[in-house]
Image (cartoon, helix red, strand yellow):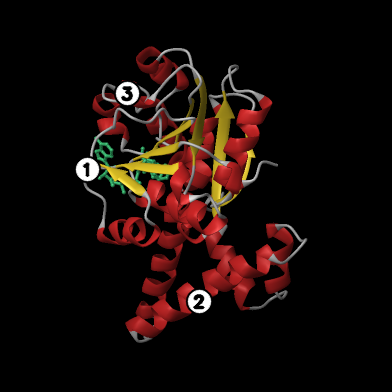
Amino acid sequence: MADLGEIEELVLVGAGNMGGAMLSGWVAGGVRREAITVIDPNPSNSIKSLLDRSGIRHHVAPPDNIKAKILVLAVKPQVMYAVLDTLAPVIDENTLVISVAAGKTLTYFEERLGKLAMIRTIPNTPSMVGRGVIGAFANGLVTEVGREKADTLLSAVGQVEWVEKEADIDAVTAISGSGPAYAFYLVECMAEAGRKLGLDEELAMRLARGTVIGAGALMDGSKDDAGTLRKNVTSPGGTTAAALEQLMAEDGLQPVFDRALEAACNRSRELAG
Ligand SMILES: NC(=O)C1=CN([C@@H]2O[C@H](COP(=O)(O)OP(=O)(O)OC[C@H]3O[C@@H](n4cnc5c(N)ncnc54)[C@H](O)[C@@H]3O)[C@@H](O)[C@H]2O)C=CC1
Ligand SMILES: O=C(O)[C@@H]1CCC=N1
């Protein structure tokens, strides 16, 4: 495992939700501030204050006095094309490129940046609190050392899962990339159902939110699988069984999740172009 303190010439392009989360993780994890350059024409106030506090170099456009050893691309897929056109000054043949953009394939990057060592990743928003899940795929030009460095950088914000086939990244995007939204939607639905049962709206939200947070923490500390944890809540003939009978009626939520994740996976493929 490489050491965050040994990272050199790390250039981050786009310091929004994802780029900003990674930047915070790197700073907290010990990447030297001199090793980082941020390129973002319009960083949020919180990122500006992190940059000011930590004294990290910041540019509104790619400077011509730095060659990135590692270049992290964290702009929206829709602006990626225009951004890639500006990056020649910060890239050479030794640059390792790491993309976090949904959908954008390694072929897309190779066609615009040339044949470089490249890693396509898909993180998720819990990366903001160091609890992300990050899917990653490396092309054949990534060395063992490059992969270790990338693993160390990504591990600063969460759990890294390497996949063997690039196509799997679309499915990873559908589960863990977009997945936090499904969990938040579950909280919204539980709270709304509680409100309909007569509870104060804010109380219902506190109960739903606390329950999902608590269930996550319980799962985190447990060796049991999700099904066993569910069965532990479910007394025969009790309240949970009554609720699950509704949730699992006919095929239950599975067909809904099948359709939802298929839609996300397809959208990820569409974003490739
Ligand atoms: N938000 C999410 O849950 C996830 C997002 N992603 C991917 O992460 C990437 C970034 O998404 P977010 O962080 O959510 O977007 P964001 O909008 O929060 O951040 C994008 C950042 O890029 C900056 N930017 C715009 N034009 C630029 C340019 N020409 N040069 C440099 N920086 C520029 C913006 O000022 C902004 O700070 C996207 O490609 C997205 O697909 C991946 C997984 C999850
Ligand atoms: O919705 C999106 O396209 C991005 C990628 C995964 C999560 N957010």
Q: Where is residue 189 in the image (x, y as percent from the top left)?
A: 40, 66
Looking at the rendering, the quadrant in which ligand 1 lies is top left
Indicate the quadrant where residue 219 lies: bottom right
Tell us which disc is closer to us: 3 or 1.
3
Q: Nearer the viewer, residue 18 or 210?
A: 18
* CA distance for labels 3 and 1: 17 Å
Sequence-first disc among 3 and 2 = 3
Q: Is residue 152 left or right of residue 129?
A: right
Q: In this view, does 215 lie to the left or right of 193?
A: right
Sequence-first disc among 1 and 2 = 1
Sequence-first disc among 3 and 1 = 1
Above or below, 116 against 205 in this view is: above
Using a 10 Å C-alpha cutoff, classify the residue at mark 3 as few (fewer than 14 neighbours), some (14 to 19) or many (20 or more). Answer: few
Residue in view at x 51 percent, y 24 percent: 118
Q: Where is residue 247 in the image (x, y as percent from the top left)?
A: 53, 61
Indicate the quadrant where residue 112 lies: top left
Residue in view at x 53 percent, y 69 percent: 212
Does the Cβ of the disc 1 residue fall within 8 Å of ligand 1?
yes
Tell us which disc is closer to us: 1 or 2.
1
Tell us which disc is closer to us: 3 or 2.
3
User: Label 1, on which residue?
Assistant: 41
For mark 3, give the secondary structure. helix
User: Label 3, on which residue?
Assistant: 89
Above or below, 118 against 15 in this view is: above
Q: Is residue 112 visible?
A: yes
Identify the amino acid type marked 2.
Gly
Above or below, 93 against 49 in this view is: above
* CA distance for labels 3 and 2: 48 Å
User: Label 2, on which residue?
Assistant: 210
For mark 2, give the secondary structure. helix
